Image (cartoon, rainbow, N blue to C red):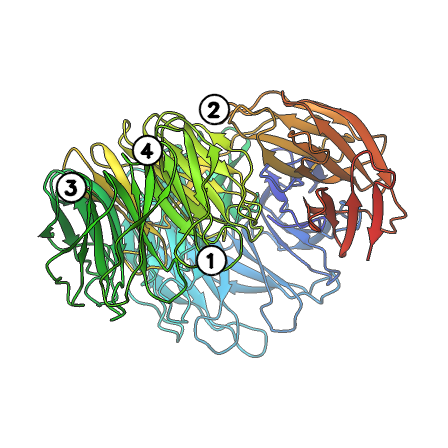
Amino acid sequence: MGDFNNDTWLDIVVVDYITDNIIIYFGYGDGTVAKPVKYSTGRGSAPYMIAVGDFDNDHRLDIAVANFGTNSVGVFLTLQNESFQSQIVLSVGSSRPVWIHVADLNNDTALDIVTANYGTHSVNVFYGYGNGSFSNSSTYSTGYDSFPFAVVSGDFNNDKQMDLAIANYGTNNVGILLGTSNSSFANQIMFSTGPNSHPCSLAVGYLNDDTMLDIAITNYGNNSVGILLGHGNGTFMTQTTYSLGGASPYSIGIDDFNNDNRMDLVITNIGTNNTALLVGYGNGTFASPTMYSTGSSSSISIAIGDLNKDNRLDIVIISNDTRTIEIMLGYDEFFPIQKMYPAGYNPWSVAVGDLNNDNYLDIVTADYTGNTVSVLFGYGDGTFQTRETYPTGSSPTYVAVADLNNDTRLDIVVTNSADNTVNIFLGYGDGSFTNPAIYLVGRYPESVVVADFNNDFIQDIAVANAEENTVSILLGYGNGSFMTHVQFSAGSCPYSIATDDFNNDTRLDIVVTNLYGNSVSVLLGHGDGSFASEMQYSVGIHPDSVAVGDLNNDARLDIVVSNRDSGLSILLGYGNGSFTNQTMYSTDLKTASVGVGDFNKDTQLDIVFVNQESNNVKIFLGFGNGSFFKQSTFSTGSLPVALAVGDFNSDDRLDIAVANWNDNQVSVLLRYDRGALKHEIKFPSGKGSRLRSFVIFDFNNDSQLDIAVANSGSDSIGILLGYDNGNFDSQMIFSTGFKSHPHSIIVNDFNKDGRVDIAAANYGTKNLITFLGNENGTFENQASYDADFDFPPLLLGANDFNQEGRSEILLYRYYMIKFAIGSSNPLMLLN
């Protein structure tokens, strides 16, 4: 793979052994490719393998081919117009080359070519001149009946000279040719791969993080993968092997598939219709192989790259028997393992914090029927000690942790629903606590949050009182004691509470869900411990839990609510304490506790919540624009009711703790960056469409995400309406004008009618075009806006940047388009 046309998108090139061609597939950047373009390698050439590199230093990738049938190397130099020159032929005698490799072997900044020759038991080296031409070949023997099948390069003895490693299929070893300073190689040193192992492919990388190159080998004969860890002096440890069962490995690649900065292995297997992925531990050892179906029993070649620009490596596989190219897109398994720990009777809520000052997170639950809190101290590796319990008041419902007396030691706050109290357990910093202090609050206190509500740098407490329709505020003295509670009105049955600064006045505000009012109440804080009258916003049916975060990266806080009977509600904030109407996302029934965090380390906030009836946790991954897509579910215990998020094993990844009501346990889901592969789902974009840009949004208000694409080749935008099973309807096409070549699109409500509209930037006609949205996902009233652009416009975003109540569009090169539908001057260009 490589970018042959310099459009920043990976392309694919393959050899066709039967028809004597190389075939190029230009990529669209979304994991799909254009129709193939063919170039002949000559009659009877039987091209066997391909490599790419810039052989003439023109900053364009060229192609080199091992022609088995004509005993030659073919070089195709790239032209500027997505085409290639005719093949330049380099003879390798009667050698029958089966492998080709490209590297700068003599440190002259010009790429060289080396072939593994099955017919003459040798390797040939062609030194490049940097202008697309090459020297005559130098030949190095690999030994009698060695039948070399693969060759790669690397500096195995740290002398700054490139060396060669060869898979000798016939003699069951890896041969090392150490490079010298005079552009030659020493005699071969051999390292055994085992009797009848028949190594057929190699890859080089740092497998144990010691700055010494290692080698991974596919042993076709004994169905294993071999690892040779390097000593850094050109020698290697004895081979370690990993069995692939009945699979016969053929081709191998090394890269980091799970973004944990440790090298992993991917292997194609012949005869078993699958591909193997071995996740690396970073110390030269690997997990057991995970197999992924390929649909082909003869997958002979592999290439690695990020085809869809999601920061996940994908693989391309060549299947000989089906004569197809298979693309397997990389994704993340997130939480493959659940660990269970006993809690008290019917744990109702869960919180996390370092309660014994050992720098490891601990877990605490409020046990509703047991009238206790349970504390599980963490070991820092994702495991926990047996619980310790502390008695509370009657029917504890919610627990929070914070430093209430400014002694740098975390304390515990618990709401007791049956006796209308709050318990305070002050921590000693060693995991033990004082006897609880008791404070009266309103009737049936359901949830609690701790924060500084009067700006005195002392922690206060806010409680949602479900049966009194109020919020209680207990202002702290800073010594672990609190004033008598003061109440503020909320909606019907306030249930879950959260706090943050919603109007950017440096004073904390409160949001609370109203379980029977199907709403949330926002109480803006005055900064003195008092609050303004509530403002209510409609959400779904029986809102259970609330969380806060900046979901669309506009520096304004937003609200997410889990509704027991109607999914998730998203309310985007305006930054002044008010919020948009809700956007709904469907979920399973009985959606309960909700939280936010960046679970896939893409710097965008995601949403996590529990589904009580289906006994699982689900994550919605965020796009960073306030919209989300559904991710896989992860099993929990029976009747999960609450969750908390934290890094339990100190690996800089967010983990999840879940309180399970029915089985009196806590589930710990550790976040593994365990890479995985899946077959892509393809949707036809239309002949010649040349997709250039896309956005994701719910255009028809059915709580399912849809896709809008810019079809540069067909002068149109397309809308694909989404179904709840992850599939999409056929594309609706809207013309952008003759030879317009739309290049980028954005969405916003440009005419303030409550419906989302689309703006497209046309590369060909250098103008902007808009489509006004209807509620059913269709668009009308196309309008074109022209300006004296001296460049094709590229859209970056749209928002009310200057708070005038109209949307502006931000363009590349720091231009601003001031844009208002129906105004007398709808377009103004600002430097």
Count of numbered badges drawn on the protein: 4
Mark positioned earlier in the residue sequence (1 or 3): 3
Whether residues under marks 4 and 3 lie with C-beta atoms below 8 angstroms apart, the answer is: no
Task: Tell me what residue is drawn at x 85 percent, y 38 percent.
Answer: 785
Task: Tell me what residue is drawn at x 15 percent, y 49 percent.
Answer: 373
Mark positioned earlier in the residue sequence (2 or 4): 4
The amino acid at mark 3 is Asp
Left or right: residue 779 versus residue 626 is: right
Residue 444 lies, with reference to residue 603, above or below; the image says above
Element under label 3?
loop
Q: Residues within 10 Å of mark 4 (few under 14, many from 20)?
A: many
Residue 632: x, y in percent? 38, 35
Q: Residues within 10 Å of mark 2 (few under 14, many from 20)?
A: few
Q: Is residue 7 visible?
A: yes
Left or right: residue 510 versus residue 772 is: left
Of residues 494 and 35, the one drawn nearer to the viewer in this rendering: 494
Find residue 724 and name its label: 2
Element under label 2?
loop
Q: Give the alpha-carbon distance from disc 4 to disc 3, as whole Å.
A: 17 Å
From the image, state whether disc 2 or disc 1 is nearer to you: 1
Which residue lies under the disc numbered 3? Answer: 419
Element under label 1?
loop
Q: Give the alpha-carbon distance from disc 2 to disc 4, as whole Å.
A: 32 Å
Which residue lies under the disc numbered 1? Answer: 507
Find residue 493 and name its label: 4
Q: Give the alpha-carbon distance from disc 2 to disc 1, as whole Å.
A: 41 Å
Of residues 358 and 569, the one drawn nearer to the viewer in this rendering: 569
Find residue 250 and name its label: none
Of residues 442 and 566, the one drawn nearer to the viewer in this rendering: 442
Whether residues under marks 1 and 3 lie with C-beta atoms below 8 angstroms apart, the answer is: no
Q: Give the alpha-carbon distance from disc 2 to disc 3, as whole Å.
A: 44 Å
